[in-house]
Amino acid sequence: MVEVIDGIGFSTKSGAIFSSLLSSDEPIRSIKDVNYENTLNGAPWAPWGISNMRPEQMRQHLIKCGVLSAGIDAKVRMAVGKGIEPFLLTDVDSDGKETLTWVNDKEIQDWLEENDDYLYSYQSVYNLLTYGWGAAQLMLSRDRSKITRIRATDSYQARLERKDEKNFRINYMYLCSDWTRVNGFDKDRMIKIPILDEGYELEDLQQTRQYEYAILHRCLKNGSQYYPPALWEAAEKWVEVSRAVPEFKKALFENSMNIKYLVSINSDYWKRIHLKWDNYTPEERTRIITEKYNKIDQFLTGAGNAGKSIISSHFVDPLSGKEVKDITIEPLVDTQRDGKLLPDSAAADKQIMFSMFLNPAIWGGNLLGDGASGGAGSGSDIREAFLVQLMLMEQERRMNLKVFNLVKRYNGWSARIEGNNGEKGRLVFRYKSGLLTTLDTGKSTKAAVM
Protein backbone atom coordinates (compact mmCIF):
# COMPACT_ATOMS: atom_id res chain seq x y z
CA MET A 1 0.00 0.00 0.00
CA VAL A 2 1.33 3.42 -0.94
CA GLU A 3 1.15 6.19 1.62
CA VAL A 4 0.61 9.59 0.01
CA ILE A 5 1.47 12.81 1.79
CA ASP A 6 1.31 16.16 -0.01
CA GLY A 7 1.30 14.44 -3.38
CA ILE A 8 4.40 12.35 -2.67
CA GLY A 9 3.95 8.63 -2.13
CA PHE A 10 6.24 5.96 -0.73
CA SER A 11 5.74 2.20 -0.67
CA THR A 12 7.49 0.06 1.91
CA LYS A 13 6.51 -2.97 -0.16
CA SER A 14 8.26 -2.21 -3.44
CA GLY A 15 10.55 0.51 -2.13
CA ALA A 16 9.29 2.96 -4.77
CA ILE A 17 8.93 6.67 -4.25
CA PHE A 18 6.43 8.50 -6.39
CA SER A 19 6.23 11.96 -7.92
CA SER A 20 9.54 13.48 -6.77
CA LEU A 21 12.91 12.78 -5.24
CA LEU A 22 13.27 12.53 -1.50
CA SER A 23 15.03 15.39 0.21
CA SER A 24 15.71 16.05 3.85
CA ASP A 25 16.88 19.15 5.64
CA GLU A 26 17.65 17.28 8.83
CA PRO A 27 21.42 16.95 9.20
CA ILE A 28 23.11 13.74 10.25
CA ARG A 29 23.88 13.90 13.95
CA SER A 30 27.48 14.23 14.99
CA ILE A 31 29.30 12.93 18.04
CA LYS A 32 30.45 15.58 20.49
CA ASP A 33 32.61 14.80 23.48
CA VAL A 34 31.75 16.29 26.82
CA ASN A 35 33.49 19.63 27.18
CA TYR A 36 34.09 21.09 30.62
CA GLU A 37 35.44 24.48 31.57
CA ASN A 38 38.79 24.63 33.27
CA THR A 39 38.38 24.05 37.00
CA LEU A 40 42.02 23.97 38.15
CA ASN A 41 42.90 27.48 39.37
CA GLY A 42 45.95 26.39 41.35
CA ALA A 43 44.34 23.35 42.97
CA PRO A 44 46.65 21.15 45.09
CA TRP A 45 46.14 18.06 42.92
CA ALA A 46 47.83 17.34 39.59
CA PRO A 47 45.28 17.79 36.78
CA TRP A 48 44.36 14.65 34.87
CA GLY A 49 44.06 15.77 31.27
CA ILE A 50 42.47 18.94 29.93
CA SER A 51 40.32 20.64 32.58
CA ASN A 52 41.11 17.70 34.89
CA MET A 53 38.37 15.66 33.17
CA ARG A 54 40.34 13.08 31.21
CA PRO A 55 38.56 10.19 33.03
CA GLU A 56 35.20 11.42 31.70
CA GLN A 57 36.49 11.27 28.13
CA MET A 58 37.78 7.75 28.80
CA ARG A 59 34.45 6.73 30.32
CA GLN A 60 32.59 7.91 27.24
CA HIS A 61 34.86 5.73 25.08
CA LEU A 62 34.26 2.75 27.37
CA ILE A 63 30.46 2.93 27.43
CA LYS A 64 30.15 3.60 23.68
CA CYS A 65 32.81 1.29 22.21
CA GLY A 66 31.81 -2.35 22.57
CA VAL A 67 35.18 -3.79 21.53
CA LEU A 68 37.07 -1.67 24.06
CA SER A 69 34.64 -2.38 26.89
CA ALA A 70 34.46 -6.13 26.23
CA GLY A 71 38.23 -6.40 25.68
CA ILE A 72 39.05 -4.82 29.03
CA ASP A 73 36.46 -6.92 30.84
CA ALA A 74 37.78 -10.11 29.23
CA LYS A 75 41.34 -9.33 30.29
CA VAL A 76 40.26 -8.59 33.86
CA ARG A 77 38.39 -11.90 34.11
CA MET A 78 41.38 -13.82 32.75
CA ALA A 79 43.79 -12.11 35.14
CA VAL A 80 41.70 -12.75 38.26
CA GLY A 81 40.55 -16.24 37.28
CA LYS A 82 38.70 -17.82 40.20
CA GLY A 83 40.19 -15.48 42.76
CA ILE A 84 43.06 -15.44 45.24
CA GLU A 85 43.97 -18.14 47.74
CA PRO A 86 46.82 -18.42 50.33
CA PHE A 87 49.44 -21.11 49.81
CA LEU A 88 52.62 -22.25 51.52
CA LEU A 89 55.43 -22.25 48.98
CA THR A 90 57.86 -25.03 49.95
CA ASP A 91 59.96 -25.56 46.83
CA VAL A 92 60.76 -24.22 43.34
CA ASP A 93 62.46 -26.50 40.81
CA SER A 94 64.94 -25.51 38.11
CA ASP A 95 62.12 -24.86 35.64
CA GLY A 96 60.42 -22.45 38.03
CA LYS A 97 57.61 -24.87 38.92
CA GLU A 98 56.37 -24.20 42.44
CA THR A 99 55.39 -26.71 45.10
CA LEU A 100 52.37 -25.24 46.89
CA THR A 101 50.19 -26.34 49.78
CA TRP A 102 46.86 -24.64 50.36
CA VAL A 103 46.67 -22.79 53.71
CA ASN A 104 43.44 -23.46 55.58
CA ASP A 105 43.89 -20.76 58.20
CA LYS A 106 40.67 -19.40 59.74
CA GLU A 107 41.94 -15.85 60.33
CA ILE A 108 43.23 -15.49 56.76
CA GLN A 109 40.21 -17.12 55.16
CA ASP A 110 37.79 -15.01 57.22
CA TRP A 111 39.71 -11.85 56.31
CA LEU A 112 39.60 -12.69 52.58
CA GLU A 113 35.89 -13.42 52.79
CA GLU A 114 35.05 -10.25 54.75
CA ASN A 115 36.92 -8.13 52.22
CA ASP A 116 35.40 -9.98 49.22
CA ASP A 117 38.85 -10.60 47.75
CA TYR A 118 37.46 -11.60 44.35
CA LEU A 119 35.49 -8.38 43.84
CA TYR A 120 38.38 -6.33 45.19
CA SER A 121 40.79 -7.99 42.74
CA TYR A 122 38.39 -7.50 39.84
CA GLN A 123 37.99 -3.79 40.56
CA SER A 124 41.71 -3.32 41.14
CA VAL A 125 42.77 -4.92 37.85
CA TYR A 126 39.93 -3.14 36.04
CA ASN A 127 41.32 0.22 37.16
CA LEU A 128 44.77 -0.71 35.88
CA LEU A 129 43.53 -1.77 32.46
CA THR A 130 40.97 1.00 32.06
CA TYR A 131 42.70 4.06 33.49
CA GLY A 132 46.35 2.97 33.52
CA TRP A 133 46.70 3.11 37.31
CA GLY A 134 44.83 2.32 40.48
CA ALA A 135 44.84 2.70 44.23
CA ALA A 136 43.59 0.88 47.31
CA GLN A 137 42.35 2.25 50.60
CA LEU A 138 43.49 0.50 53.79
CA MET A 139 41.49 0.77 57.04
CA LEU A 140 43.18 -0.09 60.34
CA SER A 141 41.77 -1.49 63.58
CA ARG A 142 41.11 0.73 66.58
CA ASP A 143 44.55 -0.02 68.07
CA ARG A 144 46.18 0.20 64.60
CA SER A 145 47.61 -3.31 64.99
CA LYS A 146 45.77 -4.84 62.04
CA ILE A 147 44.61 -3.93 58.56
CA THR A 148 40.93 -4.83 58.79
CA ARG A 149 39.52 -3.62 55.48
CA ILE A 150 40.73 -2.92 51.98
CA ARG A 151 38.82 -1.13 49.24
CA ALA A 152 39.65 -0.68 45.57
CA THR A 153 39.51 3.05 44.86
CA ASP A 154 37.51 4.15 41.83
CA SER A 155 40.24 5.76 39.72
CA TYR A 156 37.59 7.87 37.97
CA GLN A 157 37.01 9.76 41.24
CA ALA A 158 40.67 9.98 42.31
CA ARG A 159 43.33 12.64 41.76
CA LEU A 160 46.90 12.71 43.07
CA GLU A 161 48.41 15.61 44.94
CA ARG A 162 51.23 17.47 43.27
CA LYS A 163 54.63 16.12 44.30
CA ASP A 164 56.37 17.53 47.33
CA GLU A 165 59.18 19.73 46.02
CA LYS A 166 61.55 18.56 48.77
CA ASN A 167 61.24 14.77 48.65
CA PHE A 168 59.36 14.27 45.35
CA ARG A 169 56.69 12.26 47.18
CA ILE A 170 52.98 12.31 46.49
CA ASN A 171 51.56 12.76 49.97
CA TYR A 172 47.80 12.69 49.41
CA MET A 173 45.07 11.33 47.18
CA TYR A 174 41.85 13.32 46.70
CA LEU A 175 38.46 11.70 46.08
CA CYS A 176 35.48 13.59 44.66
CA SER A 177 32.27 12.39 43.05
CA ASP A 178 31.94 15.45 40.78
CA TRP A 179 35.15 17.19 39.79
CA THR A 180 33.32 19.78 37.69
CA ARG A 181 32.04 21.46 40.88
CA VAL A 182 35.36 22.06 42.64
CA ASN A 183 38.37 24.24 41.88
CA GLY A 184 40.19 23.76 45.18
CA PHE A 185 40.03 21.56 48.23
CA ASP A 186 36.43 21.47 49.50
CA LYS A 187 35.95 19.41 52.66
CA ASP A 188 32.20 19.23 52.01
CA ARG A 189 32.60 17.66 48.56
CA MET A 190 35.82 15.67 48.75
CA ILE A 191 38.07 13.67 51.05
CA LYS A 192 41.84 13.67 51.40
CA ILE A 193 43.67 10.40 52.12
CA PRO A 194 47.41 10.12 52.94
CA ILE A 195 49.41 7.94 50.54
CA LEU A 196 51.98 5.43 51.77
CA ASP A 197 55.43 6.07 50.34
CA GLU A 198 55.77 4.07 47.13
CA GLY A 199 58.24 1.21 47.60
CA TYR A 200 58.34 1.72 51.39
CA GLU A 201 54.71 1.07 52.25
CA LEU A 202 55.31 -1.32 55.15
CA GLU A 203 57.88 0.91 56.88
CA ASP A 204 55.61 3.91 56.38
CA LEU A 205 52.59 2.05 57.73
CA GLN A 206 54.46 0.85 60.82
CA GLN A 207 54.92 4.48 61.82
CA THR A 208 51.24 5.21 61.34
CA ARG A 209 49.31 7.82 63.23
CA GLN A 210 46.04 7.58 61.29
CA TYR A 211 43.39 4.95 60.54
CA GLU A 212 43.14 5.12 56.75
CA TYR A 213 45.80 5.16 54.06
CA ALA A 214 46.07 4.77 50.31
CA ILE A 215 48.50 2.59 48.40
CA LEU A 216 49.17 3.20 44.69
CA HIS A 217 49.23 0.65 41.86
CA ARG A 218 51.04 2.09 38.88
CA CYS A 219 54.05 1.63 36.63
CA LEU A 220 55.53 4.98 35.62
CA LYS A 221 56.62 5.14 32.00
CA ASN A 222 56.96 7.54 29.09
CA GLY A 223 57.50 10.51 31.37
CA SER A 224 54.19 10.15 33.22
CA GLN A 225 54.68 11.46 36.75
CA TYR A 226 51.13 11.00 38.01
CA TYR A 227 48.71 9.15 35.72
CA PRO A 228 50.32 6.50 33.48
CA PRO A 229 48.39 5.95 30.23
CA ALA A 230 46.41 2.75 29.72
CA LEU A 231 47.53 0.55 26.83
CA TRP A 232 44.40 1.21 24.78
CA GLU A 233 44.99 4.97 24.79
CA ALA A 234 47.62 4.47 22.08
CA ALA A 235 44.74 3.46 19.81
CA GLU A 236 42.34 6.20 20.91
CA LYS A 237 41.86 7.52 17.38
CA TRP A 238 40.78 4.02 16.35
CA VAL A 239 38.38 3.98 19.27
CA GLU A 240 36.82 7.14 17.86
CA VAL A 241 36.49 5.44 14.47
CA SER A 242 34.88 2.38 16.05
CA ARG A 243 32.41 4.65 17.85
CA ALA A 244 31.66 6.82 14.82
CA VAL A 245 30.72 4.05 12.38
CA PRO A 246 27.60 2.79 14.20
CA GLU A 247 26.56 6.39 14.91
CA PHE A 248 26.84 7.17 11.20
CA LYS A 249 24.91 4.04 10.25
CA LYS A 250 22.18 4.80 12.77
CA ALA A 251 21.86 8.37 11.52
CA LEU A 252 21.72 7.09 7.94
CA PHE A 253 18.80 4.81 8.72
CA GLU A 254 17.01 7.49 10.71
CA ASN A 255 17.41 10.20 8.10
CA SER A 256 16.81 8.33 4.87
CA MET A 257 14.57 5.75 3.19
CA ASN A 258 15.55 2.55 1.44
CA ILE A 259 14.46 3.65 -2.05
CA LYS A 260 14.54 1.21 -4.99
CA TYR A 261 12.62 3.11 -7.68
CA LEU A 262 11.86 6.70 -8.57
CA VAL A 263 8.49 6.94 -10.31
CA SER A 264 7.81 10.29 -11.97
CA ILE A 265 4.35 11.07 -13.38
CA ASN A 266 3.96 14.16 -15.50
CA SER A 267 1.47 16.62 -14.05
CA ASP A 268 -0.29 16.98 -17.45
CA TYR A 269 -0.90 13.24 -17.51
CA TRP A 270 -3.81 13.53 -15.08
CA LYS A 271 -5.54 16.21 -17.14
CA ARG A 272 -5.26 14.26 -20.40
CA ILE A 273 -6.54 11.04 -18.83
CA HIS A 274 -9.25 12.76 -16.81
CA LEU A 275 -10.82 15.49 -18.93
CA LYS A 276 -12.70 16.94 -15.94
CA TRP A 277 -9.61 16.97 -13.71
CA ASP A 278 -9.83 20.68 -12.99
CA ASN A 279 -13.37 20.21 -11.70
CA TYR A 280 -12.50 17.39 -9.28
CA THR A 281 -12.30 18.09 -5.58
CA PRO A 282 -8.92 17.67 -3.82
CA GLU A 283 -10.23 14.47 -2.21
CA GLU A 284 -11.17 13.00 -5.61
CA ARG A 285 -7.79 13.87 -7.10
CA THR A 286 -5.97 12.26 -4.15
CA ARG A 287 -8.07 9.09 -4.55
CA ILE A 288 -7.25 8.85 -8.26
CA ILE A 289 -3.52 9.50 -7.69
CA THR A 290 -3.35 6.92 -4.91
CA GLU A 291 -5.08 4.28 -7.03
CA LYS A 292 -2.54 4.85 -9.81
CA TYR A 293 0.36 4.66 -7.41
CA ASN A 294 -0.93 1.37 -6.02
CA LYS A 295 -1.30 -0.14 -9.49
CA ILE A 296 2.29 0.73 -10.33
CA ASP A 297 3.41 -0.52 -6.93
CA GLN A 298 1.76 -3.90 -7.55
CA PHE A 299 3.43 -4.03 -10.94
CA LEU A 300 6.89 -3.51 -9.39
CA THR A 301 6.42 -6.01 -6.55
CA GLY A 302 6.90 -9.76 -6.46
CA ALA A 303 9.12 -12.35 -8.15
CA GLY A 304 6.45 -13.04 -10.76
CA ASN A 305 6.79 -9.51 -12.06
CA ALA A 306 10.54 -9.66 -12.51
CA GLY A 307 11.67 -8.85 -16.02
CA LYS A 308 8.40 -7.19 -17.02
CA SER A 309 8.39 -4.14 -19.22
CA ILE A 310 6.22 -1.11 -18.73
CA ILE A 311 4.82 0.69 -21.75
CA SER A 312 4.19 4.37 -21.24
CA SER A 313 2.74 6.94 -23.66
CA HIS A 314 4.34 10.24 -24.35
CA PHE A 315 3.44 13.56 -25.86
CA VAL A 316 5.20 16.49 -27.52
CA ASP A 317 5.66 19.62 -25.45
CA PRO A 318 4.24 22.42 -27.62
CA LEU A 319 6.77 24.93 -26.30
CA SER A 320 10.01 22.96 -26.45
CA GLY A 321 9.00 20.53 -29.17
CA LYS A 322 10.51 17.66 -27.15
CA GLU A 323 8.87 14.36 -26.34
CA VAL A 324 7.77 14.05 -22.69
CA LYS A 325 6.90 10.70 -21.13
CA ASP A 326 3.75 10.38 -19.06
CA ILE A 327 5.33 7.93 -16.57
CA THR A 328 9.03 7.32 -15.92
CA ILE A 329 10.36 4.55 -13.67
CA GLU A 330 14.02 4.79 -12.74
CA PRO A 331 15.81 2.09 -10.64
CA LEU A 332 17.98 3.56 -7.89
CA VAL A 333 21.18 2.20 -6.37
CA ASP A 334 20.74 1.05 -2.75
CA THR A 335 23.63 2.81 -0.96
CA GLN A 336 22.83 1.12 2.35
CA ARG A 337 23.65 -2.40 1.16
CA ASP A 338 27.23 -1.89 0.04
CA GLY A 339 28.78 -2.36 3.50
CA LYS A 340 30.26 1.09 3.41
CA LEU A 341 32.54 1.82 6.40
CA LEU A 342 32.37 -1.78 7.71
CA PRO A 343 36.00 -2.50 6.70
CA ASP A 344 37.01 0.67 8.57
CA SER A 345 35.12 -0.52 11.63
CA ALA A 346 36.80 -3.94 11.47
CA ALA A 347 40.24 -2.34 11.14
CA ALA A 348 39.52 -0.11 14.14
CA ASP A 349 38.41 -3.07 16.26
CA LYS A 350 41.61 -4.94 15.44
CA GLN A 351 43.86 -1.99 16.24
CA ILE A 352 42.13 -1.52 19.60
CA MET A 353 42.61 -5.16 20.58
CA PHE A 354 46.21 -5.26 19.35
CA SER A 355 47.06 -2.16 21.42
CA MET A 356 45.69 -3.98 24.49
CA PHE A 357 47.69 -7.19 23.90
CA LEU A 358 44.42 -9.03 23.42
CA ASN A 359 44.31 -11.86 20.87
CA PRO A 360 40.83 -11.78 19.27
CA ALA A 361 40.99 -15.53 18.68
CA ILE A 362 40.18 -16.08 22.37
CA TRP A 363 36.52 -15.19 21.93
CA GLY A 364 36.05 -15.47 18.16
CA GLY A 365 36.73 -11.79 17.60
CA ASN A 366 38.95 -12.52 14.60
CA LEU A 367 35.76 -12.64 12.51
CA LEU A 368 35.53 -8.90 12.09
CA GLY A 369 33.78 -8.71 8.76
CA ASP A 370 36.47 -7.37 6.44
CA GLY A 371 37.41 -10.61 4.72
CA ALA A 372 41.02 -10.42 5.88
CA SER A 373 40.68 -12.07 9.25
CA GLY A 374 40.54 -15.71 8.26
CA GLY A 375 38.35 -18.30 9.92
CA ALA A 376 37.13 -18.52 13.45
CA GLY A 377 40.14 -20.54 14.47
CA SER A 378 40.43 -24.00 15.96
CA GLY A 379 40.24 -25.02 19.58
CA SER A 380 44.03 -25.12 19.61
CA ASP A 381 44.15 -21.48 18.51
CA ILE A 382 41.83 -20.47 21.32
CA ARG A 383 43.66 -22.55 23.93
CA GLU A 384 47.11 -21.28 23.01
CA ALA A 385 45.93 -17.68 22.74
CA PHE A 386 44.41 -17.99 26.23
CA LEU A 387 47.66 -19.36 27.69
CA VAL A 388 49.68 -16.54 26.14
CA GLN A 389 47.18 -14.04 27.50
CA LEU A 390 47.59 -15.44 31.02
CA MET A 391 51.34 -14.94 30.80
CA LEU A 392 50.91 -11.36 29.60
CA MET A 393 48.68 -10.57 32.58
CA GLU A 394 51.41 -11.31 35.14
CA GLN A 395 52.16 -7.63 35.71
CA GLU A 396 48.55 -6.79 36.61
CA ARG A 397 48.30 -9.79 38.93
CA ARG A 398 51.46 -8.85 40.79
CA MET A 399 50.42 -5.23 41.15
CA ASN A 400 47.13 -6.42 42.64
CA LEU A 401 48.99 -8.74 45.07
CA LYS A 402 50.91 -5.77 46.42
CA VAL A 403 48.16 -5.09 48.96
CA PHE A 404 47.79 -8.72 50.04
CA ASN A 405 51.54 -9.04 50.57
CA LEU A 406 51.49 -5.89 52.69
CA VAL A 407 48.57 -7.19 54.77
CA LYS A 408 50.16 -10.60 55.45
CA ARG A 409 53.25 -8.95 56.90
CA TYR A 410 51.55 -6.13 58.82
CA ASN A 411 48.92 -8.47 60.30
CA GLY A 412 51.56 -10.98 61.35
CA TRP A 413 50.36 -13.85 59.16
CA SER A 414 53.78 -14.48 57.62
CA ALA A 415 55.51 -14.81 60.99
CA ARG A 416 52.79 -17.10 62.35
CA ILE A 417 52.39 -19.39 59.30
CA GLU A 418 55.99 -19.62 58.13
CA GLY A 419 57.58 -20.42 61.49
CA ASN A 420 61.13 -19.47 62.40
CA ASN A 421 63.06 -18.10 59.42
CA GLY A 422 60.44 -19.52 57.07
CA GLU A 423 61.49 -23.08 57.80
CA LYS A 424 58.03 -24.42 56.89
CA GLY A 425 57.88 -22.46 53.66
CA ARG A 426 56.78 -19.01 52.56
CA LEU A 427 53.21 -17.68 52.74
CA VAL A 428 52.19 -16.54 49.26
CA PHE A 429 48.98 -15.65 47.45
CA ARG A 430 48.22 -17.15 44.08
CA TYR A 431 45.42 -16.98 41.53
CA LYS A 432 43.35 -20.01 40.64
CA SER A 433 42.23 -20.39 37.04
CA GLY A 434 40.65 -22.92 34.72
CA LEU A 435 42.61 -23.90 31.61
CA LEU A 436 41.37 -25.50 28.41
CA THR A 437 42.88 -28.92 27.73
CA THR A 438 43.33 -31.11 24.68
CA LEU A 439 40.70 -33.75 23.91
CA ASP A 440 43.04 -36.66 24.66
CA THR A 441 43.00 -35.79 28.37
CA GLY A 442 39.37 -36.85 28.64
CA LYS A 443 38.16 -33.52 30.05
CA SER A 444 37.71 -30.02 28.71
CA THR A 445 39.37 -28.02 31.52
CA LYS A 446 41.87 -28.40 34.32
CA ALA A 447 42.62 -26.30 37.38
CA ALA A 448 45.79 -24.25 37.53
CA VAL A 449 47.49 -22.01 40.09
CA MET A 450 49.39 -18.94 38.92
Image: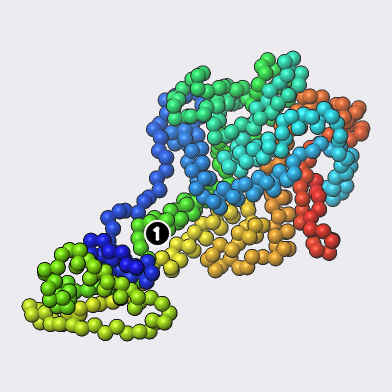
Q: Residue at x 52, y 23 (%)?
A: 190
* The quadrant where residue 253 appears: bottom left
Residue 7 percent location from the top left of the image:
23, 64
- Give the labeled residue for mark 1: 253
* The quadrant where residue 271 appears: bottom left
Q: Residue at x 54, y 56 (%)?
A: 349
Q: Nearer the viewer, residue 239 or 207?
A: 239
Question: Along the horizontal axis of the image, is 119 left or right of 423?
Answer: left
Question: Along the horizontal axis of the image, is 197 left or right of 338?
Answer: right
Q: Residues within 10 Å of mark 1 (few under 14, many from 20)?
A: few
Q: Is residue 222 something that shows in the picture?
A: no
Q: Residue furthest left?
A: 319
Task: Name the amino acid type tagged 1.
Answer: Phe
Instruction: State the SS at label 1.
Output: helix
Q: Which part of the image, by quadrant, shows the C terminus?
A: top right
Q: Which part of the image, by quadrant, shows the N terminus?
A: bottom left
> Above or below — where is 110 with respect to 284?
above
Q: Is residue 392 something that shows in the picture?
A: yes
Q: Residue at x 84, y 61 (%)?
A: 442
Residue 356 percent location from the top left of the image:
60, 50
Residue 122 percent location from the top left of the image:
67, 40
Question: Along the horizontal axis of the image, is 357 left or right of 444?
Answer: left
